[in-house]
Amino acid sequence: MTDSEDTKLITGGRRKEWTHGVVNPPVYRASTCLFDSYAHLRERIADPSAKQLFYGRKGTPTQWALEEALTDLEGADGTMLFPSGIAAVTTAILSLVKAGDHILITDSAYEPTRTFANGILQAMNIETEFYDPMIGGNISTLLRENTSVIVTESPGSLTFEIQDIPAIVAAAKANGTCTVTDNTWATPLLFKPLDHGVDISVEACTKYIGGHSDSMIGSASAKGEVWKKLSRTAYQMGHMVSPDDAFLTSRGLRTLGIRMKAHQENALKVAAWLKDHPMVESVLHPAFEDCPGHDLWKRDFKGSSGLFSIVLKTGDYPDTATMVDDMRLFKMGFSWGGYESLILPSNPTHCRSAVPWQAPGPVLRLHIGLEDTDDLIADLEDGLERYRLRVGR
Ligand SMILES: *Cc1c(COP(=O)(O)O)cnc(C)c1O
């Protein structure tokens, strides 16, 4: 019998040989691992992929427990951990490319992913082309013989377009091209990229999986030959994660299910209130019809999380200071996915090249935390009134 997802979150990675009987896998700190004999040393060297103590950089039961739990949730053969979400994104791409290749990245990608492509990949003579996130199966028109990777991110950072991942994967497979999905918004609870044929699923565990705004960590999960390439590349790059961050992330994982349900419910309430506000032009939330790809979200996702954007009717970014400087509960900060609500003026204009961003007013990205939604709405109501007085409407 296979356990349901809620149960897997509780039991994942808690092998007795790793916990020695305590509930959560403890923090094992190690650089040097000691061998009993020459024969023991030879045995440990023989299978470098085995989860056996060998050298601190290959991890300890603290990291293996988290890897195993994530591998199971993603439906993968294995998971590598990284010191940040962006290290997971960049290493996933690196494991699939070589000099002279062409790759495709969605125009809605997380900005540091774009920076990596325009920096390190370009210096390696790998050409990146940014594409319209709504391209769907027409991505086949952009595929070349040397297109090695398509990077998707659904929904897109800041603007929340949902991509047609199954159509993109079908076009990629027909061309012998690999696919990588940045799945941070959904987590494997709401969307499982590998089940839709994606080759590498990346999560910035810094966000919902850790869930408490106090650790930096990323993961990349894959199957078969791609898993071998990914794990080899990550090891060669020297990536590893501190046992403390792995421990905190394992601990966060136990409550991911109930936290995601609460983020979803709170965000839907706040977003519904914002949608009717006279200063709000549109709500960019995949569960709302204004959001590009809303039908694809209904088809492919199991729910929504707590991050979305609103477009204001009028005004400009400096005007938002009157709103965001004096919020009582919504604080300004980049990394989201913790229990606290956040607000961030986020102008997509400078991180778009395929499809220029156009909107009548500024974009505010909101993360809805676990506070009482009436309190959150009151805070937004006051903030939007300050903004209205400022822009004179
Ligand atoms: C935050 C984020 C990342 C990067 O994670 P870090 O741990 O901050 O490096 C990658 N992708 C998306 C979509 C993110 O929101």
Image (spheres, rainbow, N blue to C red):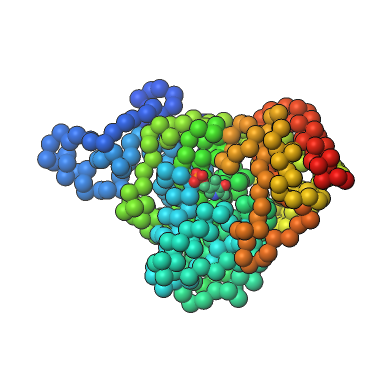
Residue at image position (52%, 35%) is 210
Residue at image position (60%, 46%) is 185
- Where residue 27 appears, x then y in whole percent? 37, 28
Asked whether residue 71 is in view, the answer is no
Check the picture and name the quadrant holding the C terminus: top right
Residue at image position (25%, 40%) is 54
Residue at image position (63%, 31%) is 340
Q: Give the farthest residue toward the top.
A: 22
Q: Compared with residue 99, is residue 41 higher up or lower down, i.e. above or below?
A: above
- Where residue 2 appears, x then y in whole percent? 53, 40
Q: Compared with residue 367, is residue 92 higher up or lower down, i.e. above or below?
A: below
Which of the pair 331/217 is nearer the observer?
331
Left-right relation of 45 to 189: left
- Where residue 164 appears, x then y in whole percent? 65, 61
Asked whether residue 367 is in view, the answer is yes
Total count of labels: 0
Left-right relation of 111 to 33: right
Q: Compared with residue 186, is residue 213 higher up or lower down, i.e. above or below?
A: above
